[in-house]
Amino acid sequence: MSHPSAPGRIVVLTGAGISKESGLDTFRDQGGLWAQMRVEDVASIEGYRRDPDLVQHFYNTRRRELGTGRVEPNPAHLALARLEREWPGEVLVVTQNVDDLHERAGSVNLIHMHGELLKVRCERCDRPLPWREDVTRASLCPDCGRAGTLRPHIVWFGEVPFEMDRIIAALERCALFVSIGTSGHVYPAAGFVAAVRQAGRAHAVELNLEPSRGASLFHEVRTGPASETVPAFVA
Ligand code: BV8
């Protein structure tokens, strides 16, 4: 990627599409995660209150999948980590994904706006805890010792995404906004490109398998698999 005179800040938004070639399901593609179940039943606080075992099972299954060793960062994750190392200005990755593939690829300046699969949160202590095993009603909080209080450290529908102030500030001052592997269905992430265009300073690029719902708001849309489009873009 050519370096402009003053190396501006880059904000990269990623969605489930960047992890697809690492073997993780997307949400809304053919056969994606939500094709197998209703979103409201597993990704909402009401769903969790209604059937905590179902929701814990949904996240236990996905957490276990991450731990199998079969799921590895792909060239798209690695290219973003290289960009962060080599770009003279700030690079911030804001991911909607709850997997740990950006970290494992080497990204450091990273926000998980929808939470992390490999963390749980005690509803009494309210502190995120690293967690790799299955969570059940019998799981004890290591801090307060209570059972039945550990929930996935995930942002469900109707809950507020994490670090929104930091994200909005970064969007308003960046020189380049790149959206990768997201369908543009879920807000507030789907509204980020509009915020960038509103600020009137950044070049906005979409790298997606197919044009997303918000494609018309980008200056540039490059279609194709992330493992090809992202390294080519970062080069
Ligand atoms: C909030 C949990 C208030 C983690 C998720 C009516 C209108 C507008 C908005 C709303 C509305 N009613 C309610 C809302 C708000 C709601 C919302 O947006 N609903 C939508 C469905 C209408 N949003 C919320 O409730 C959010 N909270 O609004 O709080 C607020 C807001 C701001 C400030 C203060 C308060 C909370 C949303 C978070 C919900 N949690 N998941 C988990 O279980 O994983 S959402 C879920 O969708 C995932 O997090 C996922 O990341 C996210 C977005 O999906 P994508 O990542 O885009 O995945 P998808 O499958 O859709 O698309 C994949 C894309 O990749 C496709 O385009 C495909 O073509 C592409 N692709 C596939 N393969 C490849 C590829 N691209 C490249 N290469 C490939 N190989």
Image: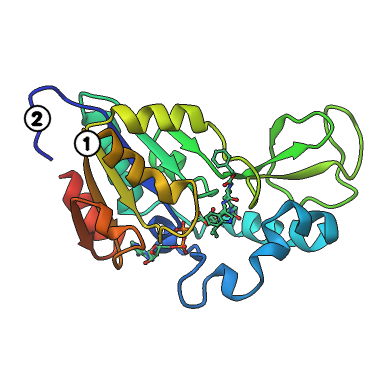
- Secondary structure at badge 1 equals loop
Give me the residue at 20% from left, 59% from top: 222
Left or right side of 202 for 91: right
In the displayed structure, 186 sits above or below 100; it is below
On screen, residue 224 above or below 80 = below
For residue 59, side relative to residue 229 (left or right): right
**Label 2 CB-ligand 1 distance < 8 A:** no
Q: Position of residue 187 (x, y in %)?
A: 49, 50
Relative to 18, residue 7 above or below: above
Residue 28 drawn at (x, y percent): 49, 69
The N terminus is located in which quarter? top left
| Residue at x 36% of width, y 63% of height | 213
Task: Work out whether residue 212 or residue 126 is closer to the camera in this orientation and state it.
Answer: 212
User: Looking at the image, which residue is at 51% across and 33% down?
Assistant: 164
Identify the image quadrant of residue 198: top left
Dividing the image into 4 quarters, which one contains the C terminus?
A: top left
Q: Which residue corresponds to mark 1?
A: 202
Q: Residues within 10 Å of mark 2 (few under 14, many from 20)?
A: few
Q: Looking at the image, can residue 94 be seen?
A: yes
Q: Which residue is mark 2?
A: 4
Displayed quadrant of residue 184: bottom left
Snapshot colouring: rainbow
Name the side, left or right, on which 173 lies relative to 72. left
Numbered badge on residue 19: none
Quadrant for residue 41, please give it.
Answer: bottom right
- Where residue 97 appears, x then y in whole percent? 50, 50
Q: Nearer the viewer, residue 34 or 70?
A: 34
Q: Secondary structure at mark 2?
A: loop
Q: Amino acid at mark 2?
A: Pro
Near-viewer residue (171 or 58): 171
Asked if disc 1 and disc 2 are in contact, CB closer than 8 Å, the reply is no
**Cα–Cα span, label 1 and label 2:** 13 Å
